């Protein structure tokens, strides 16, 4: 998710949904880790896993995001207390002072709610493009990478509290 959002380099495909799709996939997998943990005898009683998710704002958002994607909206009150409004992209394009006007070409339109910020700096070289995945939840904007990073930290905290560590290869 981070690589897709931040390693765009010289070419940005406005309207490309790869980053949004990766965001959805991350939050679905992040939330559904609970199903594996609840079956693991080290995490008894299983309701402790659910209670931990509810007690942690980022994991509560992950639960709500996952269920919003899965069910095309929530049918029950959200754990976080907020509903997912949109997933958008915030594109930034930095042009060097040597960039010729004809170098910039938009072949697609951004999706509704996406933003494009164009700036010009004194550096030399081709344009540099980046993008952020923005989650609008309960009317508030959140950087998806920040929320995802907090989810990972929360799961690490939970696993550590149960003396469980996974080998990283």
Image (cartoon, rainbow, N blue to C red):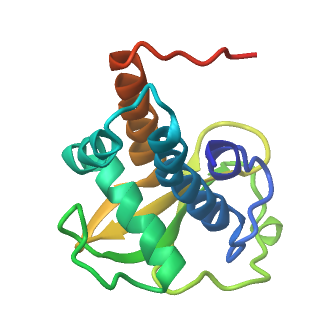
- Observer-nearest of 12 and 96: 12
Query: Residue sitting at 58 percent across and 52 percent down?
Result: 29
Query: Residue sitting at 51 percent across and 42 percent down?
Result: 39
Q: Position of residue 127 (x, y in %)?
A: 73, 51
Residue 163, compared with residue 3, is above or below; it is: above
Query: Residue sitting at 40 percent across and 84 percent down?
Result: 73
**Residue 107, quarter of the rendered image:** bottom right
How many numbered marks appear?
0
Residue 133 visible, this orientation:
yes
Q: Position of residue 136 (x, y in %)?
A: 35, 70
Left or right: 14 as drawn, with respect to 42: right
Residue 119 visible, this orientation:
no
Residue 42, compared with residue 95, is above or below; it is: above
Quadrant of the image containing the C terminus? top right
Query: Residue sitting at 82 percent across and 65 percent down?
Result: 103
Q: Position of residue 164 (x, y in %)?
A: 48, 17
Residue 48, compared with residue 132, is above or below; it is: above
Left or right: 36 as drawn, with respect to 67: right
């Amino acid at each position: 998710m981070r690589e897709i959002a931040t390693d765009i380099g010289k070419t940005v495909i406005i309207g490309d949904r790869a980053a949004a799709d990766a965001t959805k996939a991350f939050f679905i997998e992040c939330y559904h880790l609970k199903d594996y943990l609840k079956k693991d005898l080290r995490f008894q009683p299983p309701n402790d896993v659910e209670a931990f998710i509810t007690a942690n704002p980022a994991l509560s958002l992950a639960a709500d995001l996952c269920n919003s994607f899965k069910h095309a909206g929530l049918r029950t009150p959200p754990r976080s207390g907020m509903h997912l409004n949109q997933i958008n992209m915030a594109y930034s394009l930095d042009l060097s002072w040597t960039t010729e006007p004809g170098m910039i070409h938009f072949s697609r339109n951004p999706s509704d709610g996406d933003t494009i910020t164009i700036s010009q700096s004194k550096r030399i070289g081709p344009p540099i493009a980046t993008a952020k995945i923005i989650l609008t939840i309960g009317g508030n904007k959140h950087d998806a990478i920040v929320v995802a990073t907090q989810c990972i930290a929360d799961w690490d905290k939970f696993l550590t509290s149960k003396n469980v560590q996974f080998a990283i290869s």
